[in-house]
Amino acid sequence: MTTRHFLSLLDFSSDELLALIDHAIDVKQRLQQGVSHTPLKGQVLAMIFEKSSTRTRVSFESGMSQLGGHAIFLSPQNIQLGRGEPIEDSARVISSMVDGIMIRTFDHERVITVAKNSSKPVINGLTDHLHPCQLLADMQTWIELRGNIQGSSVAWIGDGNNMCHSYINAAIRFDFTLHIGCPAGHEPNSDLVKSAGGRIKIFHSADEAVRQADLVVTDVWASMGQEQEQEERLKVFAPFQISGKIMKLANKDALFMHCLPAHRGEEVTAEVLESEQSVIWQEAENRLHSQKSLLERLLK
C-alpha cells in the first residue's frame, strides 16, 4: 500500500479535509468532556525540528500523548543529521523505527526528500514554502464559528509567504475567494496563484484587499531566516498593518486570525489582537485538535 503523506493541503481532497476537520471538532469535544480517546496507543511520532517552534512542538507532542502514543523530539544538535548525515539516510533509518515523522524545516525540498525516503507517513510541520497544519486549525476555527467557508471572502494582508501560499491552497480546496494585499515585490509564488484560477486577486493596497472581507488574516513581516531584513521590512510593510481602521473596511462581523507569534504594533495593533473579532486563541488551540485528527488519519 502506498504511504500517505501530508506535505500540502493539496495532498488531500476537499472531502477528506472537511472530514478531518469534522473529526477534529469531535476529538476536541471528547477531550473537553474528559472522554478517553487513545487510538494511537503504542505508536511513536518522530519530530524533526530544524526550525524552532512553540505551537508546533507543544501541539504534536501533547496530541500524541493524548491519543495514547509518544513523540520524540529531534533537533540537528542531538542527532547525526546535524553532523552531515544526508537527510535521505536519516529518513530511511528513522522511519524504520517509528510510525510517523513530522518535520519542520526551511527548504521545502527537504520535506519532499524525507517523504520520498520514508516508509512511514510524513507531515509537513512548516517550510519556507507552506504551512498546511496551520490551515487545518484556521479552517476548523472558521467552521466552528461560522460554518462552511465556501463562497466567503478572505483577505490575506502582508507578505506573500508560506502562510499566504497555504491560504491559496485552502482557497482551492475549500472554494473561497482570496484577496491578497501585499507590497510590490512581495507577492506570493506566481505558479501557485495561477493554479487557483479566478479565486485569487492581488492588490498592492491593504484597504482594497480588505473591503467586504469575511475573514482577515496576517502574519509577521519578517519570518525566521529573514531577521537581517527586519528594519527594511518594517518600512515597506508599514502601510499593511492591521488596525481598527482597516478592520472597519471588512464586513461588520469579520473575524481576524494570526498564526502567532504576533508582534504587537507591527503587523497588527494590540487593539485588533484583543478585540472581539480576534479568534487567535481559539485558532492556536485548534492546532492541537486538528493535528490529532490528522495523526489518526495517517498513523491509524
Image (cartoon, rainbow, N blue to C red):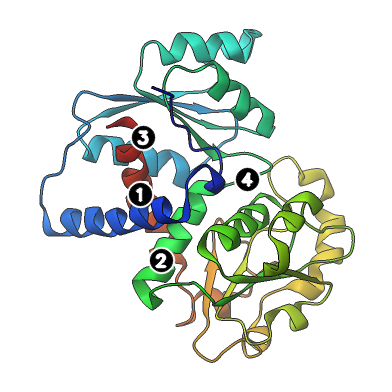
Q: Are marks 4 and 2 in contact (CB under 8 Å)?
A: no
Rendered-image quadrant of the N terminus:
top left
- The kind of residue on which mark 1 rests is Leu
Query: Which dot, 3 or 4, sits closer to the camera?
Result: 3
According to the image, label 3 marks what residue? 298
**Could you say where residue 132 lies in the image, as x and y percent from the top left?**
53, 48
Q: Residues within 10 Å of mark 3 (few under 14, many from 20)?
A: some
Q: Earlier in the sequence, mark 4 or mark 2?
A: 4
Q: Name the side, left or right, on which 21 lies relative to 8.
A: left
Q: Name the side, left or right, on which 208 lies relative to 236.
A: left
Query: In this view of the protein, can residue 207 be seen by the observer?
Result: yes
Label 1 – label 3 distance at C-alpha: 15 Å
Q: Earlier in the sequence, mark 4 or mark 1?
A: 4
Q: Residues within 10 Å of mark 4 (few under 14, many from 20)?
A: many
Q: Earlier in the sequence, mark 2 or mark 3?
A: 2
Q: Residue at x 44, y 13 (%)?
A: 94
Q: Which mark is residue 262?
A: none
Label 2 – label 3 distance at C-alpha: 22 Å
- The kind of residue on which mark 4 rests is Leu
Q: Mark 2 falls on what kind of element?
A: helix
According to the image, label 4 marks what residue? 130
Label 1 – label 2 distance at C-alpha: 12 Å
Q: Earlier in the sequence, mark 3 or mark 4?
A: 4
Q: Residue at x 62, y 7 (%)?
A: 85
According to the image, label 1 marks what residue? 288
